[in-house]
Amino acid sequence: MNNYTSCEAGLGAKRSSYLWRKVLTKENKQPNILPFSLTYCLDDEGLYFYFSTFRYGIELNSYKKFYKFQISKYHIIENLITEANAKLLKTTDDYRQFLFLPNKEYFDYMNQHGIWDITYTSKKLIYPIASKEIVSLITDFVCFYPIYANYLRISCGSETILENQISKLKKWLIENLDNKLDLLN
C-alpha cells in the first residue's frame, strides 16, 4: 500500500513543440513541454503554491532570455512577489553570499554561472485551513500569474506584457476589494 503524503495540481506548459519555437533543449530540439510550472501543493503540513523553472527533468540550452526578463523587470517583479506573499528560494550552494542582498544580484550570479534554478514559494496555509485563507491564497496565485505567463510568452517568441497584465491585475484587485466593501455596507 502506498503512503501518499502530498499532491500537486498546477499549470504546466505542454503543447506542440512548434509553439515553444524560441527555446531549445540541451539536445537542440524544440521541447513539447517547458521546464517550469505554477503549482499548488497540498502536503501533510498545509497548502501553498510554487513557481519552479526546473521541472520534468528538462534542461534548456540557454536561459539568458528568462534571466534578462527577471533582471530587466526586477522592480516590477519584486512588487508582484510582495503582493503575492511569495519569496524567492535561493538554492545555489553559494546562497549565503546573497543574504540581505537584492534578488537581482542573485539572478546576475546565476546567469553568469549558467545555473538555471528559479523557485518562488508562497506562504503555507497550515491546517485547519479556513475558506477565507484559501481565497487569500488564490488571490496571491493570481498576483503571481503574470510572471508565469510572461515566461510562456518568452518561450513563444512573443513580447512580454508584464505592465499591461499588472494594469489588469490592479483593476481586478480594486473591483474585488470594492465588492467586499459593498457586502459589508
Image (cartoon, rainbow, N blue to C red):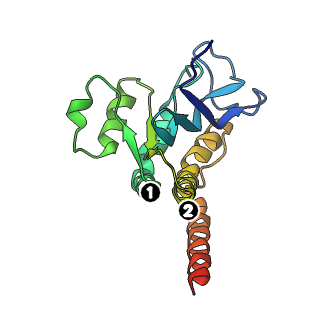
Residue drawn at the location 68% of the way across and 17% of the way down: 29
Q: Where is mark 1, residue-wise?
A: 76
When asked about the image quadrant of residue 138, the answer is bottom right
Dot 1 lies on which element? helix
| Numbered mark located on residue 13 in the image | none
- Spatial separation of the CA atoms under disc 1 and disc 2: 9 Å
Tell me which amino acid carries mark 2: Ile
Q: Are marks 1 and 2 in contact (CB under 8 Å)?
A: yes
Relative image position of residue 115 (x, y in whole percent): 40, 24
Tell me which amino acid carries mark 1: Ile
Nearest the eye: 78 or 172? 172
Instruction: Work out whether mark 1 precedes mark 2 in sequence or the reverse, and give the earlier one.
Output: 1
The answer to whether residue 43 is left or right of residue 34 is left
Q: Give the crowd class for mark 2: few <14, some 14-19, many >=20 residues within 10 Å.
A: some
Relative image position of residue 21 (x, y in whole percent): 70, 31
Nearest the eye: 169 or 46? 46
Q: Where is mark 2, residue-wise?
A: 166
The answer to whether residue 143 is left or right of residue 121 is right
